[in-house]
Image: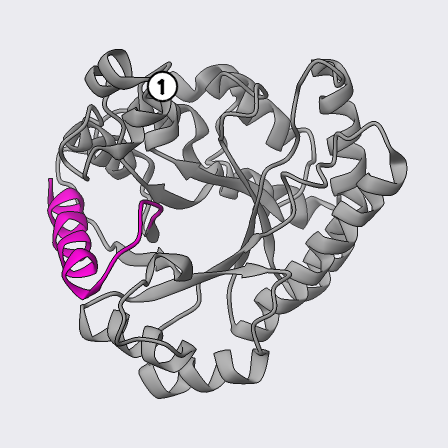
Amino acid sequence: MDALDRRRFLQLSGGVALTAGLALPLSPTPRRKMKKAVKLGMVQDPGATTVADKFQLLRDLGFDGVELDSPSDLDPDEVLAAKEASGLAIPGVVDSVHWGKPFSHPDPDVRRQGVEALQTALRDCARYGGTSVLVVPAVVNKQVTYDQAYERSQAEIRQVLPLAAELGLRIAFENVWNQFLLSPLEAARYVDEFESEHVGWHFDVGNVVNYGWPEQWVRILAGRILKLDIKEFSRKRRDEEGLWKGFDAKLLEGDCDWPAVMAALDAIGYEGWGTAEISGGDRAHLRDTAERMDRIFAS
């Protein structure tokens, strides 16, 4: 990395060393420029059967963008026509095979297929005018140890960085329940070790609530956060109905402390996309989602 790239990387990460992330002050005068999006699969209105219908419905409801899966069977020309007709942005795409073909898999051929899928996702993202590809970096399980997941995933992802640089895109890691990168300090370190401005975090707020506090992650990850996923989690429903039922809470009806999260985002100067990743539904459900997201962003 030359001196210019290193300076740009430090600017991206806010110049924050791993152990200094806790020191960010809260901004006394929040100034937010947030854009709201959903995942395309959430659009389940019976009157919206085509890609164009779905894009226009989201635009009519006040959404700014939509995220798509890749690789997928979507017709790129149809997607681009829907984008142009509706004026809806495609801020990024989601790697569709990162669970089935993880970069931490013991089989090198499976890892190779995962790399190829990420390359496809990057090319699709560039074609659609997006800026990042969401990807789960690794999965730890009985067969894959933590250290193996760490080393294998970094080695595989490094192979894709030249393409990301060529396309001017970023690979955005999502925090999920994959038994990997379980603390914000480690998550920050994982990104920093790439020494590249082409990696960062697609931070999922709701995924943290089961075992931590999202606002703490925001302040530590700081400028490494490229985009946000917006979802809720209820500890009460988790305790009474089962672990995964915690995600059934509607936005603003769980245990995400949204004012604290927004204050932390203000502190790091985040201005960008927040994408709902919740259950889908019809026009009324999506309208309600848009309104709740507006309330979250204003909290």
Residue 171 shown left or right of residue 202 in the figure: right
Task: Check the image and report above or below for 209 versus 27.
Answer: above
Q: Mark 1 points at which residue?
A: 243
Q: Is residue 98 above or below residue 253?
A: below
- The crowding category of the residue bearing disc 1, from other C-alpha atoms within 10 Å (few below 14, some 14 to 19, many at least 20), is some
- Front residue (pair 144, 245): 245
The residue under the point 62% across, 30% down is: 192
Residue 108, above or below 144:
below
From the top left corner, tell me how far across and down residue 177 is, in percent: 50, 25
Q: In this view, does 17 lie above or below 267?
A: above
Residue 260 lies in quadrant: top left
Residue 136: in magenta span: no
Q: What element carries label 1?
A: helix
Residue 106 relative to residue 154: left or right: right
x, y percent for residue 161? 73, 50
Which residue is found at the position 41% from the left and 58% from the top?
A: 41
Q: Which quadrant does the N terminus fall into? A: top right
- Residue at the spot 67% in from the left edge and 18% down from the top edge: 141
